[in-house]
Image: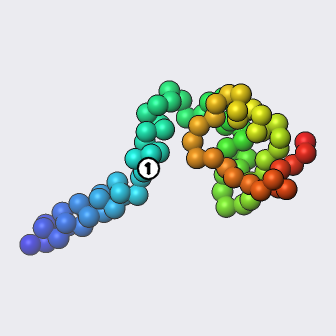
Amino acid sequence: MRGKHWRSLLIGTSLLLVGGCASSEEWNTWRSNTSHFASKEHYDFSMKNSGGSSASVTRNDITMAKNQNWFGRPVTVAQEQILER
C-alpha cells in the first residue's frame, strides 16, 4: 500500500512538472530555430531584459531585431518608452 502512494506522488509530480513546460507555440519556435538566440546581440538583449523589471529598449535594438530576424516572444513597450540611444 505504501508503495502505491509513493508511485502516485511521483507520477503526479512528474505530470505537473511536464505540464509546466513550454506551450505548443513555444515548442514550434524552438523546433524551427537551430539555436536559442539569433545572435550575440539577441542574447545580450534577452539577458538585459530578463526578470520582472520593465524592458529597456533602444531604437538600435529594434533595428537589430528586424535585421537579424530575432525570434521568440516579443518584448513590447510603448513608443514613449523607447530610449534614444
Q: Which residue is mark 1?
A: 22
Q: Residues within 10 Å of mark 1 (few under 14, many from 20)?
A: few
Image location of residue 69, percent across then percent down: 64, 30
Q: Give percent across and percent down for residue 66.
A: 70, 33
Q: Position of residue 28 (x, y in %)?
A: 43, 39
Direction from residue 26 to residue 80 in the image, left or right: right
Query: Outermost residue, right direction?
Result: 84
56 lies above or below 62: below
Q: Nearer the viewer, residue 77 or 46?
A: 77
Residue drawn at (30%, 57%), measured in percent from left and top?
14
Q: Residue visible at 13% across and 72% down? A: 2
Instruction: Judge from the rendering whether residue 41 lies leftward or rightward of residue 73; answer left or right.
Output: right
What is the quadrant of residue 58 in the picture?
top right
Residue drawn 58% across and 47% down? Answer: 73
Q: Quadrant of the C terminus?
A: top right
Q: Is residue 51 above or below residue 28?
A: below
Q: Is residue 5 left or right of residue 48?
A: left
Query: Residue 52's x, y, as percent?
Result: 67, 61
Image height of 78 relative to 61, above or below = below
| In the image, residue 51 above or below residue 8 | above
Q: Say what amino acid the circle numbered 1 marks.
A: Ala
Q: Quadrant of the N terminus?
A: bottom left
- The secondary structure type at the circle numbered 1 is loop
Q: Residue furthest front?
A: 79
Residue plotted at (85% across, 56% down): 80
Compare residues 60 and 18 and report the one nearer the observer.
Answer: 60
Colour style of the rendered protein structure? rainbow
